[in-house]
Amino acid sequence: MDEVKAVGVKDLKNDLSSFLRDVKAGSRILVTDRGTVVAELRQPGAGAQQLVADSEIEEWVSEGR
């Protein structure tokens, strides 16, 4: 399973290269602002299958299936 890390905006800014290397290695980074998650960094395409599945389900619902 991929590693999930949380990092504050200030720490992300100060060490962006390191966090991008972690993402490249497969980690997901949750970016927080005052303890609230405001963004997620992950490899491109990660979760794309779920987006396709969600859009397919929406299509089925609109067709009444």
Image: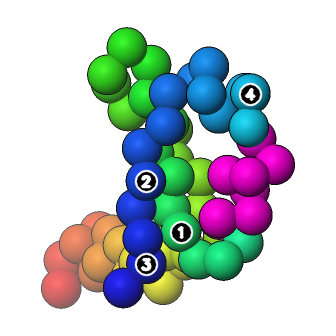
Q: Earlier in the sequence, mark 4 or mark 3?
A: 3
Tag 4 or tag 2, which sits nearer the N-term? Answer: 2
Q: Which residue is mark 1?
A: 27
Q: Which residue is mark 4?
A: 14
Residue extent of the magenta highlight: 16-23
Task: Determine whether label 2 and label 1 are within 8 Å by CB.
Answer: yes
| Residue that label 2 marks | 5
Residue drawn at x 65%, y 33% is: 12
Instruction: Give the amino acid type for the residue marked by disc 1 in the picture.
Output: Ser
As helix, strand or loop, the secondary structure at mark 4 comes to helix
Evaluate if marks 3 and 1 touch, with contact meaning CB atoms under 8 Å apart. yes
Q: Residues within 10 Å of mark 1 (few under 14, many from 20)?
A: some
Q: Residue 61's spot in the image, x, y percent?
A: 23, 72
Which three-letter amino acid code belongs to the residue tagged 3?
A: Asp
State the separation of the CA atoms marked 4 and 3.
Answer: 23 Å
First of labels 4, 1 by sequence position: 4
Q: Is residue 36 shown to the viewer in this render?
A: yes
Q: Which residue has dot 3 on it?
A: 2
> CA–CA distance between discs 4 and 1?
18 Å
